Image (cartoon, rainbow, N blue to C red):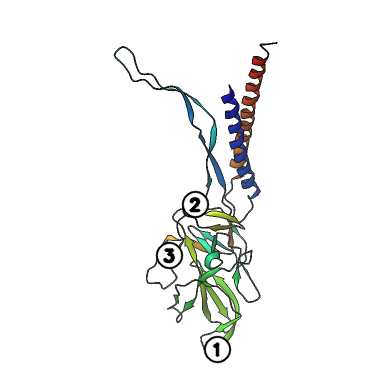
Amino acid sequence: MLRSLYAGISGMKVNQVKLDVIGNNIANAGTTAFKSSRVRFKDMVSQTSSEAVAPGISQGGINPKQVGLGVQVAGIDSMVEQGSMQPTSRVLDVAIDGEGYLVVGSGADTSYTRDGALTQDKNGALLNSDGLTVMGYSITGAAGLEKAGTDLVALTIPDAMKGADGKDHKVKSFSIEEDGVIKGFLDDNSVVMIGQIAMASFKNPAGLSKVGGNLYQSTSNSGAAVMRSGIGAATDNSKSYGSMLSQMLEMSNVDLAEQFTDMIIAQRAFQASGKSITTGDEILQEILALKR
């Protein structure tokens, strides 16, 4: 009887966790590139009243008799499926269609994100919404023979670049291609390669740690970041990565219909666990009332 009280408490605790996760998912239904989470449960250890008995000559086998002692959280999983795309008509908005994460920050402070709402500072540096630098590759070489470097650098879109005539010309506009290459259009009608936005992938993206601000950091179970090779690299692994879609943003992958259904189930399970506690309490009161 007391076991039912503690089992009821465990049921209320885990369903409270589930409601917390569902609440966070719903709150981030409009967050750019947000990845929802789900809660899984597992039973606790069971108390054995009698062990299993093997079949004998005159008697069949007997199964073990066990009483479960409650429930606990088995895991909180990140659902890394891609969200839908939303057109924005803004050149600095990029969505990753497929595998990959943008690399922001530098050195020991490197983080990863699928939020491609980029901005620029007064110097032309590419930044995310929190002011972290967007990392990529510098590009060298003649037109049609471009080759990206192998070291990550902070990307900057300058005010002027050398045109086909070798003179400095103003960068009138720019575009971001599917491979992450930033093309600059100069006032002499020539086109130059400014740089290439880097992209990282992970063996286990669900193992990434959310650190807020739509940012992720690698963990011991996500695996180290595998960088997409730049254009012109000797070894090309770019086909295993997604495409960058300019003037688009990836939306949250939260399914509100699913979340509200899960909320109803978790709420009823919470109430049922509470009811098992009150029922056990009523039985205890009956026992205490036997001696008056």
Left or right, 113 with reference to 239: right
Find numbered disc 2 in the image and state the secondary structure of the residue it sits on: helix
Disc 1 residue type (three-letter): Lys
Above-or-below relation of 230 to 260? below
> Foreground mark, 2 or 3?
2
Q: Position of residue 236 (x, y in %)?
A: 39, 67
- Distance between the alpha carbons at the discs numbered 2 and 1: 49 Å
Circle 1 sits on which residue?
A: 167
| Mark 2 Cα shell of 10 Å, populated few (<14), some (14-19), many (≥20) | some
Circle 2 sits on which residue?
A: 207
Do callouts 2 and 3 mark residues in contact (Cβ within 8 Å)? no
- Distance between the alpha carbons at the discs numbered 2 and 3: 22 Å
Sequence-wise, the earlier of marks 2 and 1 is: 1
Instruction: Name the residue located 55 percent from the left edge and 43 percent from the top edge.
Output: 38
Find numbered disc 1 in the image and state the secondary structure of the residue it sits on: loop
Sequence-wise, the earlier of marks 2 and 3 is: 2
For the C terminus, give its image quadrant: top right
* Residue 167 visible at all: yes
* Residue 261 visible at all: no
Disc 2 residue type (three-letter): Gly
Above-or-below relation of 288 to 240? above
Q: Quadrant of residue 278?
A: top right
